[in-house]
Amino acid sequence: MRSVRMLVAAALVAAAAPAFAQGKATDSAKDDQGATADPAQQRAIDESYRGRCEAKVPRELCSCVIAVADSQIGDPTERQIFYDFMMGDVEKAKAARGAFAPEKNMRFNLALQKADVMLGDQCDKLKPKAPEAPEGQSPAAPSGR
């Protein structure tokens, strides 16, 4: 009798675990991406970044950065901050990030760390090479030596 109760209890726990985990995952996704991530808003942010980016570097590099953002940063506000950092608008990005609650800032920091690793693994190889000095000229020597 006792073993039957334990089996029933184990079956109930096993049956409830996926439903509980699904609910927690949904809540976590909402927390990470705000109330709801609007795909149209994300596309607009991506396209704005793409326009600014492609004016400076190759299209492939910009597409790689957007792919990293797609995989790591779902919240439109966080995505805009990520792109501001990428474009060198550090003060603007820091100001926007300063409005985050500490918990959101911590989650965003983790996403930025993951994105940074992915950028190094996937996108650095797409960066344009620095132009080489013409033949007969040496590259500029560092000052003070």
Image: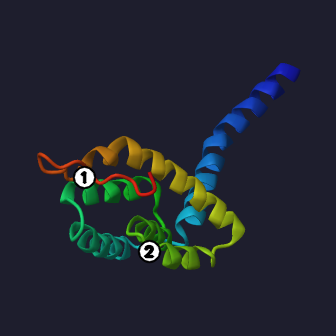
Q: Nearer the viewer, residue 8 or 82?
A: 82
Q: Is residue 126 left or right of residue 32?
A: left
For disc 2, the marked residue is 89
Is residue 76 shown to the viewer in this render?
Answer: yes
Q: Is residue 81 left or right of residue 14?
A: left
What's the CA distance linking mark 1 and mark 2?
A: 22 Å
Tell which residue pokes out farthest to the right in this image. 2
**Figure quadrant of the N terminus:** top right
Residue drawn 38% across and 57% down? Answer: 70
Q: Nearer the viewer, residue 47 or 26?
A: 47
Toward which corner of the image does residue 108 lie, by quadrant?
Answer: bottom right
Residue drawn 23% across and 48% down? Answer: 138
Q: Nearer the viewer, residue 57 or 65?
A: 57
Residue drawn 74% across and 30% down? Answer: 10
Q: Report the disc number at residue 130.
A: 1
Provide the secondary structure element on which disc 2 rests.
Answer: loop
Provide the secondary structure element on which disc 1 rests.
Answer: loop
